Image (cartoon, grey):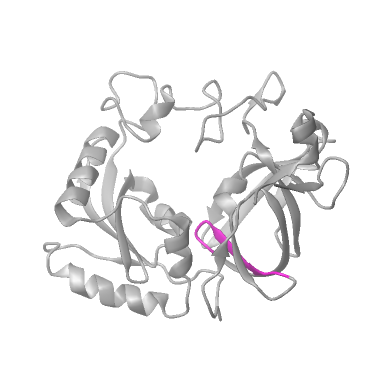
Amino acid sequence: MMFRDAAEIMGETPEDCHRSHVTGLNWKGFEPILTERIISTGEERRLRLEPLDIFVSEARRCVGARDGGPCHSQIEPRMSLCRSCDPFPVQECRFHPRCRGTMCDGTVCGEPHVVYLAIFADQVKVGMTRLSRLRERGIEQGADIIVPLQEHPNRQEARRAEQALSKDRGLPQAMSLSVLASCLDDDAAEKAAMRWEELSGSMGPGVEPILLDSYPLNGLVGVPKVMPTAGKHRGELMGCKGRLAVYRDEIGMLKALDMKDLVSRFLGTAPSRCAQSTLF
C-alpha cells in the first residue's frame, strides 16, 4: 500500500497544507542535522525526530530559494534542487561527469577526488567523492570503515576509475536500503574489520582504513524494516546510522526511515484536512 496526502489527491499544493518543508540534511561529526522551513513564518530551524511523530508528503519540491523566497519548483528524481537552483551547471554531472572541470563554470568537477572502498559490516562497495570530504562521505553513508584507494585530479577521472574498479573487483557502486538496514547491528564494526582484513592484502601498500565507530545507534536487536518515506512515522527513536533513522513503532516493530529522502518533502504532525493518509 502507498500513502498520499488527501490534499495532493484533491489537487491542492503541498505548500498550502503542511507545517514545514524539509530543506537539508548535514552531519556534525556523527550527528545528523535535519533542517526544516516553517511554511507559515519562513523560519529555518532544526528538525528533531525525537519524539518521532510525523506525516510525510508524497510531493517533493526544490529546497532552493529565489526572488527572496522559497523556490518550490518541480525537481528530478534523486534531486532536492531544481536545475535553476543547483550549483552544478549541468545537473547530470553529479552522477556522470562530462568534463574535467574545463567545460563548465562549476568548481566541483575540477577538484581532486578520491576513489574509496566503503565497508558496512561484511558488505563492501566502491565509490568516489571529493578528497576534502572523504570522512564525511563515509559517515553520511553509514560505513563502518572507509578506505581511500586512489586519488585523481578531477571528478571525471575518478568516476572512470571507480567504474573500472567496480568491474575488476566485482563490487557494487551502490547499496540498497534493505542491505544497509541488514548491516545495522552491534557487531558491525567487528565484521567490517574482519572484511577489511580479507581484502587488505590485495589492495597494495600504503592503504590505510579510516574507522567510523561513533554512530548514535547502540543496543539494536534485529533488522529494521525500511519503510516508504511518504506516510506516517511514529514511535521511539532508537538512533541513526548514515541515512537511516531507526525507530520502534507503537506495536514494537523495528522500522527505519530514510532521512536523505525526507529532504524536499513536506511534513505535518497530526492528521488534518491536508495530512490525512489515504491507503490504496
Q: Would you say 178 lies left or right of 16 here?
A: left
* Picture residue at 79% right of the left edge, 39% below the top: 6
State the residue in front, 82 or 207. Answer: 82
* Picture residue at 85% right of the left edge, 50% below the top: 271
Residue 107 seen from this side: no
Image x and y of residue 176, in percent: 42, 55
Q: Which of the 4 image quadrants contains residue 67?
A: top right
Image x and y of residue 181, in percent: 48, 65
Image x and y of residue 208, in percent: 24, 65
Q: Which of the 4 image quadrants contains residue 110?
A: top left
* Picture residue at 39% right of the left edge, 68% below the top: 144
- Residue lying farthest to the front in this orientation: 280
* Picture residue at 54% right of the left edge, 20% below the top: 84
Q: Which of the 4 image quadrants contains residue 275?
A: top right
Residue 186 seen from this side: yes
Residue 116 falls within the magenta-colored stretch: no
- Residue lying farthest to the right in this orientation: 273
Looking at the picture, does residue 89 appear above or below residue 260?
above
Q: Would you say 259 lies left or right of 251 here?
A: left
Give the residues drawn in magenta, as a range.
241-249
State the residue in front, 199 or 66. Answer: 199
Q: Total label count?
A: 0
Image x and y of residue 246, in percent: 60, 66
Q: Would you say 229 lies left or right of 101 here?
A: right
State the residue in front, 253 or 150. Answer: 253
